[in-house]
Image (spheres, helix red, strand yellow):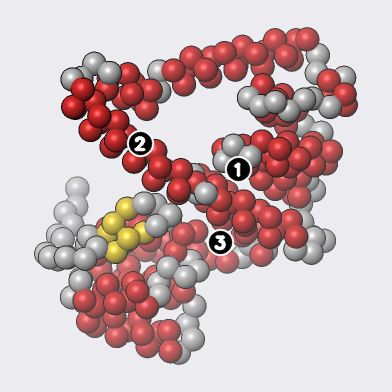
Amino acid sequence: MSILFCRPEPVKHPFYVEPLGIHIWSSQELCYIIYHNPLLVLEDFADEHLIAFIREELDMEYLAVRLEKLVKSGEGADQLLFAILAECSYYPAAEQNQFRQEVAALKKLSPSEYAKKKGDYMFGLKQYGKAVSIYTKLLEAPRDPAGAPGFTGKIWCNLGCAYSRMFQFEKAYSAFDRAYLELKEPEILKKIYFLTCFSSLELKELYKSQMTPEMKKTWDQELSEAREQARASESVLKLEALFEKDPIKRMAGASKLVKQWKQEYRGMI
C-alpha cells in the first residue's frame, strides 16, 4: 500500500468542467480529470483559463509559468497535460507513463477515427448535442478511403442514437435508415422498431417485410422490461417520495428535482 500526501489548497473559485458538470477544487482533482478523460482534455482543455486557475487558486506559479512557456514555444496540448501530471505528483511515474501511452495511441488514429471516438465519448457523458455536432461534421467530411468497412454506417447509427436521446425522432429515424442501408444489421432494425413504438412514426414497408413475428415478440418483451425498469428508476422513486411529504416540503423538493432535470437536459443539448 502507498500513501499520497495532498497539498493544502484553499481554493475560493473552483474551475468548472462543463462537459462533466463538476467543479475542480484541488490539483489532485485536476490530475484525476486529466488522467481519466484524455479525450476531453487533449484539445483545448489546458487553456489560459486553466493556467490562471493553477496560478491564482492552486498557488502553483512555477507550473503556470512552465505551461505558458510551453504554449509560446508551440508545444502540443499533450505536453501541457504531461507537465501538469508531473508537477502535481498525484500519480506515480508508472501511471503517468501509462497515460502517455494512451495519448500516443489516440494520436495515431486517423482524424475520422479520432473524431468518432470523441463523439462516442461525448455521447457517454450524455452530451448528446455535442455528439451530434461531431458525428454530423464527420459525415460531411470527405470519406477516408482507408477507413474500415461500415465505418460510415456506424456513425449514422450513433447519430440516430444521439437524436433519439434528444427526442428528435424524425432525425433519428432518418439516421437509422441510412445506417441500416449500409450495415443491414438486425440491431439497427430493432432500434427502428423501438423508435416507432415511442413516436408517431410508421415503419416503412421495407422494414415490415424484414421483421418476423419472432423478432417482434422478442423486442416487445425487451420493451416491456425496459418500461418496468423505467418505472423503478431513481428519478421516478424520488418523484413518488415527494408526494408522501407535507405540501411545503413537497413543493421545495419538486422545485429542486425540476431544476436538476433542467440542468441535465441543458447538458444533453
Q: Which secondary structure lies at badge 3?
A: helix
- Which of pointers 3 and 2 lies earlier in the amino acid sequence? 3
What label sits on residue 83 in the rendered view?
none
What label sits on residue 258 in the rendered view?
2
| Coordinates of residue 134 in the picture (x, y in percent) | 62, 57
Tell me if 202 is positioned left or right of 161 in this view: right
Check if mark 3's residue and mark 2's residue have beta carbons within 8 Å.
no
Tell me, yes or no, if residue 100 can be seen here.
no
Distance of mark 2 from mark 1, alpha carbons? 23 Å
Q: Label 3 sits on what residue type? A: Ala
Distance of mark 3 from mark 2, alpha carbons? 41 Å
Tell me if 2 is positioned left or right of 257 in this view: left
Identified at 32% across, 67% down, the residue is 85
Q: Nearer the viewer, mark 3 or mark 2?
A: 2
| Coordinates of residue 52 in the picture (x, y in percent) | 29, 77
Query: Which residue was labeled with disc 1?
Result: 162
Q: Label 1 sits on what residue type? A: Ala
Q: Label 2 sits on what residue type? A: Val
State whether residue 253 is above or below residue 209: below
Q: Which secondary structure lies at badge 1?
A: helix
Query: Which residue was labeled with disc 3?
Result: 105
- Which of pointers 2 and 1 lies earlier in the amino acid sequence? 1
Identified at 70% across, 58% down, the residue is 138
Could you say which quadrant of the image residue 257 lies in? top left
State whether residue 26 is above or below residue 205: below
As rendered, which of 171 and 176 lies closer to the eye?
171
State whether residue 269 is above or below residue 235: below
Identified at 36% across, 85% down, the residue is 68
| Coordinates of residue 122 in the picture (x, y in percent) | 52, 51
Q: Nearer the viewer, mark 1 or mark 3?
A: 1
